[in-house]
Amino acid sequence: MVDHARLPGSKTLVVQVGDALRQSIQSGEFSPGDKLPSEAMLTKKYDVSRTVVREAIASLRSDGLVEARQGAGVFVLNSHSLLRAAGPLDKKQIAGDLEYLEVRAPIEIEAARLAAQRRSPAQEEEIFRLHGVFRNLIETAPSAEVRRADLDLHLAIADATNNPVFRNFLEAFGRGAIPQSKIVDGSAQEQLIAYRRFIFDEHERILHAIAMGDAEGAENAMRVHLKGGQMRYRELLIGKRLSEAGTGNT
């Protein structure tokens, strides 16, 4: 059994197992309410120690993806539970954000793949610098500043394709390229920080694949990121409609 804290040239085993489980959850392999396989089964599946599995699951818990129920096991939560509306939601704004995400997805998925193949050392360095900027804004920055940092990172990935049309495409959207709906209650600071960290982790998986020259991995990580965003906004829109139907509002 492999049980090193870090393998040469790779992420830690804890991060590897955590990433694999996150992708299984975000891809729908494990749905909300499903029970994760036991520690023993995960230990065997990933060929790691129970300690690695426990720490990986702890990272999922901190992201709000799973919860441990005493005597029952670990269960998948609705990842969209990180989203808490800041007062009444604007259906038109949410629908508009969803439309942008749907159009961005095929373009940026391809951009991530090409960036993994074509990025220069300077472009890669810039991508990681902007990832650090985003990280430093997670806990205290206003939402507008975080959205700007988010867009800057995606623009840097577009630049790394060495095809200027990708940047032109994103710049044409302007601020609309990054969702504007206030879907997390700004007064609930812990929820806001958790949501930003969730996005940061999705970005990190994209960047890791790009840096490793893993075109397929970069493509898949960007797909998870943008398709996951679509799912989150679509669920908000459905919830708003159901709420209105229940109260008789239109």
Image (spheres, rainbow, N blue to C red):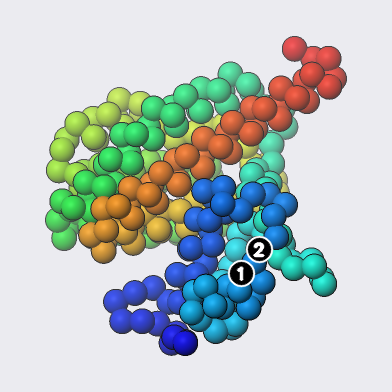
Q: In this orientation, which residue lies closer to the viewer: 240 or 86?
A: 240
Q: Nearer the viewer, residue 160 or 147?
A: 160
In the orientation shown, which residue stands out farthest toward the right?
A: 247
* For residue 82, above or below residue 232: below
- Looking at the image, tell me whether mark 1 or mark 2 is earlier in sequence order: 2
Three-letter residue code for mark 2 = Leu
Q: Is residue 138 above or below residue 15?
A: above
User: Which residue in the protein does label 2 denote?
Assistant: 36
Q: Which mark is residue 57?
A: 1
Q: Amino acid at mark 1?
A: Ile
- For image coordinates 30% across by 52% down, the residue present is 216
Q: Is residue 80 visible?
A: yes
Disc 1 to disc 2: CB gap under 8 Å: yes
Q: Secondary structure at mark 1?
A: helix
Q: Quadrant of the C terminus?
A: top right
Position of residue 41 measured from the top left corner of the image (x, y, whole percent): 61, 74
On the image, the x and y values in percent for residue 65 come to: 63, 56
Q: Residues within 10 Å of mark 1 (few under 14, many from 20)?
A: many
Q: For mark 2, does the 10 Å Cα neighbourhood hold few (<14), some (14 to 19), or many (20 or more) residues?
A: some
Say left or right for 107 vs 203.
Answer: left
Kindly identify the residue that appears in the image at 33 percent across and 41 percent down: 109
What residue lies at 28% left-to-right and 40% top-to-bottom?
110
Count of marks, rendered view: 2
Q: Residue at x 59, y 31 (%)?
A: 234
Image position, residue 243 (x, y; %):
78, 25
Query: How far separated are the C-alphas under marks 1 and 2?
Result: 10 Å
| Dot 2: element | loop
